[in-house]
Image: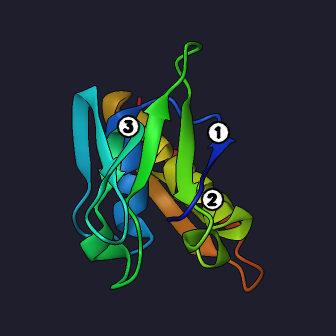
Amino acid sequence: MSHFTRVRTALREPDLLAAALAAVGFGEVEVHDAPQTLYGYRGDARPERAEVIVRRRHVGSASNDIGFARRGDGAFEAIVSEYDRTRYGAAWLTEVARAYGYAATVRYAETHGFEIATDEVDRDGTRRITLRRTV
């Protein structure tokens, strides 16, 4: 039985988190108003619960669910099993956070009347976005 580790994040919006997870390769992401049970690699119910979930069938054949549970301060914490941390550890969470930032920028642009003038990604992964609004 794998041990689950909790990692704090600064991510707060479940729809943006789901968009970020989709951007890093998870086509199916569950978003719930109330925490739901996470399951282990054998399909066993675990005591951990989360509002944003990538089910194990989308993670890998011997994997556990990956969840993001809302904390008291409104931010989500990632819940990743010890087994899955080898692939979905700190570097992966950084990638999710970058994708979240991009999704937040696009949403801001759309809701405030901006258009994306340029969107470039450097070799080192740095993303430069220029927003433009005509007045």
Residue denoted by label 3: 50
Count the labels in the image: 3
Q: Nearer the viewer, residue 79 or 113?
A: 79
Please name the residue shown 70% across and 75% down the image. Answer: 125
Q: Nearer the viewer, residue 105 or 39?
A: 39
Q: Are marks 2 and 1 in contact (CB under 8 Å)?
A: yes
Disc with the residue nearer the chain's start (1 vs 3): 1
Q: Residue flagged by tag 2: what amino acid is it? A: Leu
| Real-space Cα separation, disc 2 to disc 1, in angstroms | 8 Å
Q: Residues within 10 Å of mark 3 (few under 14, many from 20)?
A: many
Residue denoted by label 1: 9
Return the x and y of residue 8 as percentages of the image width and height: 67, 38
Residue denoted by label 2: 93
Which residue is at the far top?
72
Return the x and y of residue 107 as percentages of the image width and height: 37, 39
Q: Is residue 114 visible?
A: no
Q: Are marks 2 and 3 in contact (CB under 8 Å)?
A: no
